[in-house]
Image: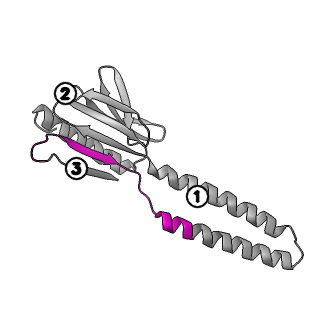
């Protein structure tokens, strides 16, 4: 998901927030885990009733493992990137981490490069290269590439390409 916050009246700064798409809220995730655990334990209870005394133990272990795996996958959706662009610099900040990379906006080149089964969106300037939006869908990376090229050309006073 790409959220564009245009420059306000006095500030010549444009901010792009890049966030992965999420299908579930935290509440929805909890409900899903409870439903899966109830189904597993019900099935295990039927198995124990028919003589398999270890079925509830295995169902309990499986329920905890599934809850842990789904929680990890859901928390991976918390990561995001903030791209701030003004007339002199382009800054990429990875969140929730503290990594910040700053480029001079005039020299930044944006390109889509093939690699690892999908196109990678790369920012390049002065021999440094940074991949952004790796968690975005293919179409979103292409859209972001176009937006960045237009914004950079506008900051540099060049016609759009």
Which of pointers 2 and 1 lies earlier in the amino acid sequence? 1
Q: Where, by quadrant of the figure, is residue 23 drawn?
A: bottom left
Q: For marks 2 and 1, give the CA distance.
A: 43 Å
Farthest right residue? Answer: 51
Q: Secondary structure at mark 1?
A: helix
Mark 2 touches mark 1? (CB < 8 Å):
no
**Which of the image's four quarters has the C terminus?**
top left
Residue closest to the eye, 35 or 27: 27
Q: For marks 3 and 1, give the CA distance.
A: 32 Å
Q: Which label was assigned to residue 70? A: 1
Question: Within the magenta stretch, is there residue 20?
Answer: yes
Which residue bears the numbered disc 3? 5
Q: Residue at x 46, y 52 (%)?
A: 77
Q: Position of residue 122 (x, y in %)?
A: 35, 34
Give the magenta range.
9-31
46 shown above or below 14: below
Q: Residue at x 31, y 27 (%)?
A: 124
156 shown above or below 53: above
Farthest top residue? Answer: 127
Which residue bears the numbered disc 2? 106
Q: Residue at x 9, y 33 (%)?
A: 157
103 shown above or below 42: above
């Amino acid at each position: 998901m790409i959220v564009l916050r245009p420059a306000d009246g006095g500030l010549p700064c444009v901010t792009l927030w890049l966030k992965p798409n999420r299908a579930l809220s935290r509440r929805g995730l909890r409900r899903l885990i409870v439903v899966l655990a109830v189904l597993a334990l019900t099935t295990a209870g039927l198995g124990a009733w028919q003589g398999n005394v270890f079925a509830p133990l295995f169902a309990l272990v499986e329920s905890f493992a599934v809850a842990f795996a789904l929680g990890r996958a859901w928390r991976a959706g918390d990561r995001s990137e903030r791209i701030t662009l003004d007339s002199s610099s382009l800054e990429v900040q990875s969140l929730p981490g503290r990594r910040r990379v700053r480029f001079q906006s005039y020299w930044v080149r944006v390109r889509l490069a093939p690699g690892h089964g999908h196109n990678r969106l790369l920012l390049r300037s002065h021999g440094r290269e940074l991949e952004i939006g790796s968690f975005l869908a293919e179409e979103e990376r292409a859209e972001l590439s176009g937006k960045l090229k237009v914004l950079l050309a506008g900051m540099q006073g060049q016609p759009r390409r």
